[in-house]
Image (cartoon, coloured by chain):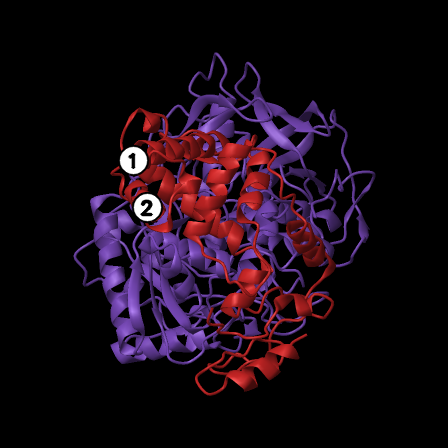
Chain colours: A red, B purple
Amino acid sequence: MNERFPGYDVLNKRAGLSWNNATRAAVDARLAVSREPRFFDAPSFAVLERLCARIIPQPKDRPPVPVAALIDAKMRRAGEIGTRVEPMPWDGEAWTRALAGLEQEARNRHGAGFAALNDISADALLHAMQDGTCDGPHWDQIPPKLFFAKRLLPDIVEAYYSHPTAWSEIGFGGPASPRGYVRMEADRKDPWEAAEAKPGEEARALRHNRHVA
Amino acid sequence: MSPEGLRATGGRAPDVFREGGWIPMRQYGLDEEVDFLIIGTGAGGGTLAGKLAEHGFSVVAMDAGPYFRPLEDFASDETEQGKLYWQDKRICTGENPLQMGGKNSGKAVGGSMVHFAMVSLRFRPEWFKSRSLLGYGADWPLDWREMWGYYRQAEQALSISGPVTYPWGPKRPRYPYRAHEINAAGKLLAKGAEALGIKWTETPLATVSAPRGEAPPCVYRGFCRFGCSTNAKQSTLNTWIPRAIKAGAEIRDLAMAGRIEVDAADRVTGVQFYRDGAWHFQKARNVVVAGYAVETPRLLLNSATQRHPQGLANSSGLVGKYLMSQSNQAVFGRMQEEVRWYKGPPSLTLTEHWNYEDKKDFFGGYCWMAQGPLPIEWAFIQTGARGLWGEALRQEMMQYNHQVGLKMVGETLPDARNSVTLADETDQYGLKIPRISFSWGENDKALIQHAIGQMTRSMEAIGAEDIFAQTEDANHLAGTARMGFTPQDSVVNADCRSWDIPNLWICDGSVFPTTGGVNPSLTIQAIALRTADRIKAMAQRGEL
């Protein structure tokens, strides 16, 4: 996989001036999230894991982001909070129904569960959901297009981009407190920011990024 | 981490400037009839609490949220800092259901100012008379010249950092603190504005550019909208709340108001609130509701009695009506150079050109500002505005450091369809939850289209590539308990005093009859400062 910020790891700053204790505690808890589902049952969780993998492909050379596990953890806390957009049900129920709908849709179309579909079939099914062109009694309780736009995409990308792997991948500076930034101009960066591997500068970027702390 | 339990108790409150620190705080008994019981401690309630206490009134101000110490409690993390938002159950409906959360709510001592973007702008004077002078919306019962003085007071109270001369509107003094250095994203707004031949300026911001008391200057960490962990940001939490406590007010954290009680003579007697695992009743001579445009009407509606079957202060039927949001659409693009918009306050520059230019074929105005979304928000924009996912999303996200954008804050017209009502479902306190209905009107859509067109021109002028518009987004709220001239046309008068119940007051963004094309927080504070002075004057004349 082509790395835009080779060798850059936001976590190398964890012990330094850019992270305060509150940040360390919050991110440590996220990295330690239980990989075992407690909100979803095992078959639903398998559908969710496959879904997350299609929505946001992950870099192969960085620690994986447990996207499905983070969504499971979020749904565990969803009992008393959240905004419900009519006519959708509350978040936890919406996810449960949508995963069941996705699974049934896969079985209707391909005679196999969603997790077993090849990438092309899985993506075609997701496009149908996004466009609202899937139909049937399994979608009666959950409007597929609305769910896809308002819950599925936001919840998955929120989980993925809450993780240091994702921050490092896109060259984001990451947590910044108490130390913020000094160089505010275009094309300027502080020594504790990631260097981009522009063509011909890959080795220099790698050398810089290894020293970010 | 969030505080595990109450912090403002036992004769002390957290010292927001010290990890683990405390300051002494006066406390009142439940049977002590305090002069003012204020519900909500944000831009309206927090400011009013400070000023009323300094005027010598006995004040208790409660907030449903925790009492944070920024230095020890605030992480540099978009997800963790969701603890600052009001996330209790709400139902959203209408043609354009509002997204509730960080842009329009707060649940903490200090309210949503704890995480606001610090943009501190004055209304255009004509907006206080938009019906008479500009032909739309409703007039305010306030005079802009009087408000100009209160704006100045609010700017001084927060040591706003801003330009020496402001390019639009009547002359105003220079801002108390010098403007901040402009980041690359802010400079690109300026370059675009100059290419279009319109004015721009450094945004007046409530984060200090030099030390002030115990607040250090801003270090440009860029997490402003997720709480300022250094106290550079001047929010209610570290300005008015400490002032209120010093002047003898009590702040009650984690205290959820459930019901305002009214006696047979139609005067409020106090408030039922939930705190520390039980319901309590606090006696008060006056109650001020300052819960913002959703929780304020919700509490008034949830306090209905046989004599007030439509809810309190609602003989006009206007409580919960004319909910407004502000249009918050944006245009984004990509630059060859590295912009790294995550550095510094997100909106260091702005243009108010279209707030002051009336040659338009729609009502109302808008400004636009430089942007600096952090990764999760940026991913929401990619998925929400463009529907991207899969490898396309991943590749777009890799361009993060080259992105630049402009985001509008636009006026929406008051529309009777847009409302806050009660649903049958209840929340964790057993209180009926709000149903929030919102749809853009035709004028709103025309204004948004115009703004997207202008912002696109600006982005083209700076040579941005892959330009796209985020066509659906809204932010600040207003309305739902409007102020006006008669008991028939409004819920409160110019002094934020209820027409129906003379010792019930409303002091937050819900009193706005119109919302203007700038961020509302400074206007909410100016109204609170004026209300405090009016209350003092009325008390001296025995008119309370």
Marks 2,1: beta carbons within 8 A: yes
Residue at the spot of label 2: A121
Side (left or right) of B283 relative to B195: right
Tag 1: Cα neighbours inside 10 Å, few (<14), some, or many (≥20)? Answer: few
Tell me, for residue B204, which label it has, or none. none
Left or right of B254? Residue B360 is left
Name the residue at 76% across, 42% down.
B7
Apparent side of residue B187 relative to residue B270 in the rendered image (left or right): left
**Front in this rendered view, residue B510 or A148:** A148
Q: Nearer the viewer, residue B446 or B139?
A: B446
**First in sequence: mark 2 or mark 1?**
1
Q: Is residue B489 above or below residue B423?
A: below
Where residue A211 appears, as percent x and y from the top left, is 66, 79
- Determine the residue located farthest toward the left in the rendered image: B361
Dot 1: chain letter: A
Q: Amino acid at mark 1?
A: Arg
Q: Which residue is mark 1?
A: A109
Label 2 amino acid?
A: Ser
- Residue at 57 percent across and 50 percent down: it is A66
Closest to the observer, B381 or B121: B381
